[in-house]
Amino acid sequence: MADPTVAGLASVHGCIGAVDPVRTFGDQEQKQRYLPKLASGERLSAFALTEPGAGSDLTALTTRAALDGDNYVVNGEKLFITNVVPGRTVGLVCLIDDKPAVLVCDLPDEENESFQLRKYGLWALKHTYNQGIIFKDFRVPRQNLLEPKKGNGLTIAYHGLNLGRISLCANAAGTMRLMMASMVPWAKFRVTYGAEIGTRELVQRRLGRLAGLVVAADALVHWCSTLIDAGYRGEMECIIDKIFGSEAQKEAAIELFMKTHGGRSFLHGHMLGDHVHEYLAPCIYEGEGEMLGMAFFKSLVKQHGTTFFEPIGKALAKLGVKQPNPLNPAHAWALKGPLWDYGKWYFGEKFGSRPSPKLPSMSANLRAHAEWAAAKLQKSSMEISDTMRKHQLKLADRQCRMSELSGRVQSLIVVLCTSLYGARQGDELIRDAADVICSDLRRQYHCHRIKDSELRIATELGTKIVDGGVRSFTEVVPDDILMSYDK
Ligand SMILES: Cc1cc2nc3c(=O)[nH]c(=O)nc-3n(C[C@H](O)[C@H](O)[C@H](O)COP(=O)(O)OP(=O)(O)OC[C@H]3O[C@@H](n4cnc5c(N)ncnc54)[C@H](O)[C@@H]3O)c2cc1C
């Protein structure tokens, strides 16, 4: 909240920049050489992955490094690199012997023939440096190569990105709190048709929803960072953080914050007018949300596909057919094993009893959300398996369906996580906010209209926020009103 730009810069430096790659994948000598300088801030760092021809598609990377004596010689171009200026340290993803690798590069203090920056105007991240880098026969000592025990340079990149995705969500939670803090004094100041807008349901609902987004983002950050601290890789979980955090911040900025501030949103000096690109760009950086949603889905179905569908595919391939003929005994014989295995799983899921989740003590409304999410998550295995059976190998091309299913599973996880997190909070308003967002997500999942009772809960929360409850979410509440006037 104190400064989202500095928080973002620290995230780039500490998560995706050189700190995490060296700390996690460096050898003792590399750690001793780099970590003290990186920790003290003597050297700030960046991570250079994206190229003009390779953003979403990392198989298209073309920056290369070739060993020449004691140095790697790097050639290629990077684009959109945050935190990069001469004199900083960069975790550079490049191809070495056609495989992605990471070199830790100390950039010279000035541009020269082998290292140049490509500058451009960029609306987002206005307060940090974001530039392209051009390397021409740029030499990096061979001892700066990071060598992971498993995987390659992309393993290193994804490890840092996981952390970056959690901190992106944390940053979104902080930024949304700033939005709330600025909405409340305005809602109390602005009078239309004889009443403060803060007494109107539309504005109250926005504040209630915003509180829900803040608490859900907090819940996800708490959950994922706990997993990371416990030693899990958390790749899929961190994707949920990143997608939820960035989408929540976008919605908060445009649907809740901008609409409530009206025309003043576009004044110079207004948070929205001055920072709107900052609120949108997280949907793109560290991976565009829908692309990540598909990656999440592919990870989700991988084991099911390998266990049950791959053996069926192999049996069909042996028979030389694409579709089995149930009347052909040879087909039935060849498929009996894999079909039996799948059938056992299928009927077990369909008719077997499901363990009910062991939930801690929690209020009835939050318990209902958690139980609903747990039950739906268990059932989603059938929904996903049916989709895999229907589309088979063409599923990879059914992007819209993958994205939709992925979104459904993610929203169940957000509900489960938020209801459990909410239940642990002592502050009643935080629990109410968890209830509001869980109800919203449940309704969206079922494509239901909102009930009067649900509207009442959200608007009552909004009313409490206007009447001082904002301090449950943020201690700092500024009182400046742009273009104030004598009422
Ligand atoms: C402010 C900012 C800061 C950044 N900081 C860094 C940084 O520090 N380091 C770094 O390495 N990178 C950084 N990036 C780059 C960022 O990670 C990429 O922009 C992002 O990964 C998307 O890549 P792209 O822009 O090349 O999109 P493209 O690859 O051009 O894709 C554009 C869109 O096309 C669609 N699309 C692409 N492929 C497919 C497909 N197969 N199927 C369906 N749809 C598809 C998706 O919607 C995608 O978002 C930054 C970007 C921004 C905007």
Image (cartoon, rainbow, N blue to C red):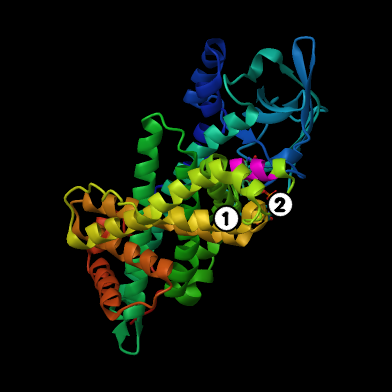
Is the Cβ of the residue at disc 1 closer than 8 Å to that at disc 2? no
In the rendered image of this protein, does residue 163 appear above or below residue 389? above
Residue 3 appears in view: no
| Residue situated furthest front in the rendering | 329
Judge by depth and name the residue closer to the eye, 296 or 426: 296
Residue 8: mark in rendering: none
Judge by depth and name the residue closer to the eye, 209 or 472: 209
Q: Quadrant of residue 54?
A: top right
Position of residue 60 measured from the top left corner of the image (x, y, whole percent): 76, 40
Q: Dot 1: within a 10 Å radius of its alpha carbon, few (fewer than 14), some, or many (20 or more) residues?
A: few
Which residue is rendered at x = 28% and y = 48% of the image? 355
Residue 112 appears in view: yes
Of marks 1 and 2, the one in the foreground: 2
In the rendered image of this protein, does residue 104 appear above or below residue 234? above
Disc 2 marks a residue whose amino acid type is: Lys
Position of residue 87 measured from the top left corner of the image (x, y, whole percent): 65, 27
Q: Earlier in the sequence, mark 1 or mark 2?
A: 2
**Of helix, strand and loop, which mostly describes the magenta segment?**
helix
Q: SS at mark 2?
A: loop
| Residue situated furthest bottom in the rendering | 193
User: Which segment did they paint magenta?
Assistant: 309-316
Position of residue 338 measured from the top left corner of the image (x, y, whole percent): 55, 42
The quadrant of the picture occupied by the C terminus is: bottom left
The residue labelled by disc 1 is: 389
Figure label count: 2
Which residue is rendered at x = 53% and y = 34% of the image? 160
For the residues labelled 1 and 2, the Cα–Cα distance comes to 13 Å
Disc 1 marks a residue whose amino acid type is: Arg
Judge by depth and name the residue closer to the eye, 450 or 470: 450
In the rendered image of this protein, does residue 431 appear above or below residue 135? below
Left or right: 53, with 238 as reference point: right
The residue labelled by disc 2 is: 322
